[in-house]
Image (spheres, rainbow, N blue to C red):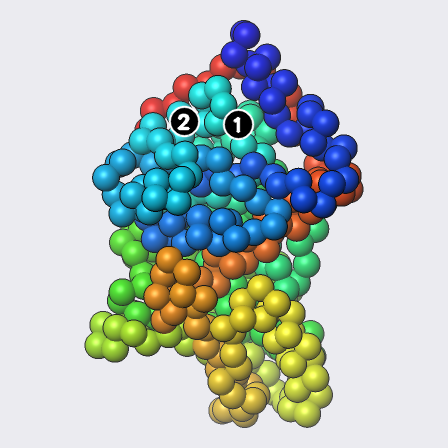
Amino acid sequence: MQFIKSLLRDTFFSSALFNSKQQNQKVRVGIIGTGKIGADLLAKVQRSNYLECVLFAGRNLDSAGMIYAAKLGVKVSDKGINAFLESGNQCDIVFDATSAAFHKEHAKLFEELGILAIDMTPSQIGECCVPALGMQEALDHRNISMISCGGQSSIPVAQVLARCIPDVKKISVSSIVSANSIGPGTLANIEEYYHNTKSGLRKYTGVADFEVALHVDEVNLETRMFTSVTAWCDAADLDALQGPLNEMLLRIQRYVPGYRLESSPMVIDGGIRIDLSVEGLGDYLPKYAGNLDIINCAAIAVAEHYAQAVVEGRQVKEAPVMHKELQMEY
């Protein structure tokens, strides 16, 4: 019981930090999952004006990600999810870069601890969020889904097409990524990837029918991410699309500088297609790994939006009161 009281005392919402308006106050961040995504998120958090990583947790202290974090002077732990229960490891935001199956268990603990969970996996638990289309979700919900790399790259363009073209019958999204920039977790959860991408498309476009495909380039291992978005329709005013597309491009490039439209809208048999590409920032990951970089950049944008709101005292959904001590197998 004393342990729980200590955690409650240290949580963000019960401290003076919540009411602070000091712009230099950083919000405490944890990362679970020490693979490529987790390590790249750490690199991005390290240069944030609003976030501070206080815990980098996984299961193997000898992994490349753990060694990288330790060299940066970040606190590391091989206790996985249980590290977040230890005194001194309290966080306000946690990026979960493990797997869909693990996040379904982790989410329970994060909810109990009142932590905002930013889900990098296709677990289908959290509220979908695409920063270019608004980030109110981060203030209204305690579990945020970053959908998928294909979702983050395609949904803003799909939203423009659905908004500007009358009677879109179906939207197709096809992405190709390097074999070096896709992990076994994504391939193992490919159906979840497709489901999450379709869910995000449905939320932001209102269209009912979708087709999603992910292809792996095993020949050109340094190919950057390419995505094609096709709106199947009877007709469209191509000139009317250009302005909204350019505006959306600028929104995305504020947090993903390497996002590019590879083509103007093209008329194809039965629809309108737009091709785009994503080049990464080259932090922990190589620049060609735009598929990983875009979802990480989006996650950082969401976390910083939440952190700014809390530091400035703007209203966010309050953390629940914890009612029991938790210990999880990991």
At numbered mark 1, what does the secondary structure look like: helix, strand or loop?
Answer: loop
Q: Which residue bears the numbered disc 1?
A: 90
First in residue order: circle 1 vs circle 2:
2
Q: Nearer the viewer, residue 172 or 159?
A: 159
Residue plotted at (41% across, 34% down)? 75
Q: Quadrant of residue 186?
A: bottom left
Residue 119 drawn at (x, y percent): 49, 45
Q: Quadrant of the N terminus?
A: top right
Q: Position of residue 183 (x, y in %)?
A: 30, 56
Instruction: Residue 174: name its quadrant.
Output: bottom left
Q: CA distance from mark 1 to mark 2?
A: 9 Å
At a point 51% along the width and 88% down the height, the residue shown is: 263
- Vertically, is 218 above or below 139? below
Name the one closer to the observer, 51 or 162.
51
Q: Are marks 1 and 2 in contact (CB under 8 Å)?
A: no
At x 40%, y 30%, the residue is 81
Task: Tell me which amino acid carries mark 1.
Answer: Gln
* Structural crowding at the residue carrying mark 1, measured as other residues with C-alpha within 10 Å and reported as few (<14), some (14–19) or many (≥20): many
> Farthest residue toward the top?
1
Identity of the residue drawn at 55% across and 26% down = 113
Q: Whole-percent x and y of residue 14? A: 69, 24
Q: Is residue 195 above or below residue 8?
A: below
The front one of 54 and 326 is 54
Q: Does residue 315 appear left or right of residue 183 in this picture?
A: right
Under mark 2, the amino acid is: Ala
Location of mark 2 (residue): 83
Q: Which mark is residue 153?
A: none
User: SS at mark 2?
Assistant: helix
Quarter holding the C terminus is top left
